[in-house]
Amino acid sequence: MASEDQSVSGVSGRYATALFDLAREEKSIDVVSVDLDKFDAMLADSADLARLVRSPVFSSDTQLKALTAILDKAGISGTTAKFLKVLTANRRLFAVADVSRAFRALVARFKGEATADVTVAEALSDKNLDSLKTALKSVTGKDVVLNVKVDPSIIGGLVVKLGSRMVDSSLRTKLNAIKHAMKEAG
């Protein structure tokens, strides 16, 4: 079971496990998941929020005041807000992205899903996303949740990471392999 899922160890794993256990007990796993996704999106979109979260310069009081205002404005409350405030009070807010990732892995395991990180050169259509999910489900026997990232530097193709397995069919990797083979032959 653990071989298919992302690791949930270390500090972030302990926090994620505590949050997951609490959310399961309160029957609020889906609400917490949505709130964490919302916070992660805000973190990705705001350099100021990212600086607040990562910088050791800010005191936990300063972080807590700012975080409280941000959570109120975003409508994040309840278990998720309390949890993020505990992270802040314990000077662990910098680990929030890892905690979110570990929490998602625990939720996926709980729901019998697998999570795949997919990197593509350009956004995929819904039809292609469905085809990819179907192909991955046939391999894993589980419903697969896709975390899609667009990275034009791979030129074409895709890179799929599912648990400990990775398939890299990107054009960049193929071109590098040809370049390496030509150097060996020359």
Image (cartoon, rainbow, N blue to C red):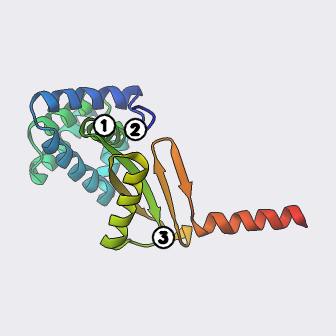
Q: CA distance from mark 3 to mark 2?
A: 25 Å
Of the residues under marks 3 and 2, which one precedes in the sequence?
2
Q: Percent from the top left, x then y, of residue 117? A: 42, 53
The residue that mark 3 highlights is: 121
Classed neighbour count for the residue bearing mark 1: other residues with Cα under 10 Å, few (<14), some (14–19), many (≥20)? some
The residue that mark 2 highlights is: 5
The residue that mark 1 highlights is: 109
Classed neighbour count for the residue bearing mark 2: other residues with Cα under 10 Å, few (<14), some (14–19), many (≥20)? many
Q: Amino acid at mark 3?
A: Ala
Q: Residue at x 25, y 55 (%)?
A: 42
Q: Amino acid at mark 2?
A: Asp
Q: Residue at x 9, y 48 (%)?
A: 72
Of the residues under marks 2 and 1, which one precedes in the sequence?
2
* Above or below, comparing residue 22 to residue 72 in the picture: above
Dot 1 lies on which element?
helix
Q: Quadrant of the N terminus?
A: top left
Mark whose residue sits in front, 1 or 3: 1
User: Is residue 15 left or right of 85 when viewed as pictured?
Assistant: right
Classed neighbour count for the residue bearing mark 3: other residues with Cα under 10 Å, few (<14), some (14–19), many (≥20)? some
